Image: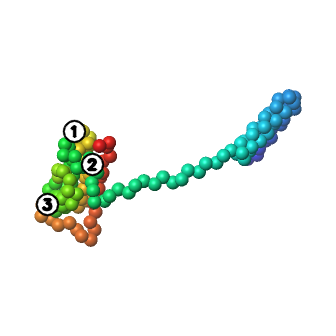
Amino acid sequence: MDTLWLNQFAILLWKNFILKKRKIGSLTVEISMTMLFCSLILLLRKYSKREFTQATFFQSLPLNELPTFLTDKKKEYELVYVPSGSDVAKNITEKVKDDLNASLRVRGFPSEEDFEKYIKQENQSVLVLAAIIFDHDFKNSNDRLPLKQLSLTLKVLYSEK
């Protein structure tokens, strides 16, 4: 049973050989065309001109200046934090806003699901610059962040500003 495929393959090869033997003209055309195209590819590779472009260098961006869309006073972008019931999360987000020295509005959401619903259903993703999601269960608004195992998620939304 294991050699059945081998027998079928041998029969298929024999049948192909018989068909090719009957038509010598087509066999010679197939072989000669294969050789012609292979040699043509080799010749083209040998005599073609190779061009290597240099690496592209971009000018560095200054770290002490914000992009122009953030300094535009016409639009006020939002810096979002989750959960909104924590004073520590709000203070950290306010500190980030002050350090950026941009016209940002700080907004809090009670949960990540509420933030995602705000983005998807109310179509406000154009105005949200980033979201800081603190992965900690705050019992009350005065709870501190755990310093040893602080876990947070930074969600930066992409949109053509």
How far separated are the C-alphas under marks 2 and 1?
A: 26 Å
Spot occupied by residue 87 in the image (x, y as percentages of width and height): 13, 60
Check disc 3 and report its element: helix, strand or loop.
Answer: helix
Q: Earlier in the sequence, mark 1 or mark 3?
A: 3
Q: Quadrant of residue 119?
A: top left
Query: Position of 12 compared to 90: left or right?
Result: right
How far separated are the C-alphas under marks 1 and 3?
A: 26 Å
Q: Which residue is mark 2?
A: 68
Residue located 21% across and 60% down the image: 99
Spot occupied by residue 69 in the image (x, y as percentages of width and height): 26, 47
The reply to whether residue 120 is visible in this rendering is: yes
Q: Which residue occupies the foreground of this view, 113 or 55?
A: 55
| Badge 2 amino acid | Thr
Compared to 33, does 94 lie above or below?
A: below
Query: Position of 141 compared to 69: left or right?
Result: left
Residue located 82% across and 29% down the image: 26
The reply to whether residue 112 is visible in this rendering is: no
| Badge 3 amino acid | Asp
Q: Earlier in the sequence, mark 2 or mark 1?
A: 2
Residue located 26% across and 42% down the image: 126
Q: Which residue is mark 1?
A: 122
| Badge 1 amino acid | Glu
Spot occupied by residue 9 in the image (x, y as percentages of width and height): 77, 40
Check disc 2 and report its element: helix, strand or loop.
Answer: helix
- Where residue 87 is drawn, which disc sits there? 3
Query: Position of 52 compared to 63: left or right?
Result: right
Are dots 1 and 3 in contact, CB under 8 Å? no
Q: Which residue occupies the foreground of this view, 131 or 134?
A: 131
Q: Nearer the viewer, mark 3 or mark 2?
A: 2
How far separated are the C-alphas under marks 3 and 2?
A: 31 Å
Q: Which residue occupies the foreground of this view, 154 or 136?
A: 154
Compared to 129, does 63 lie above or below?
A: below
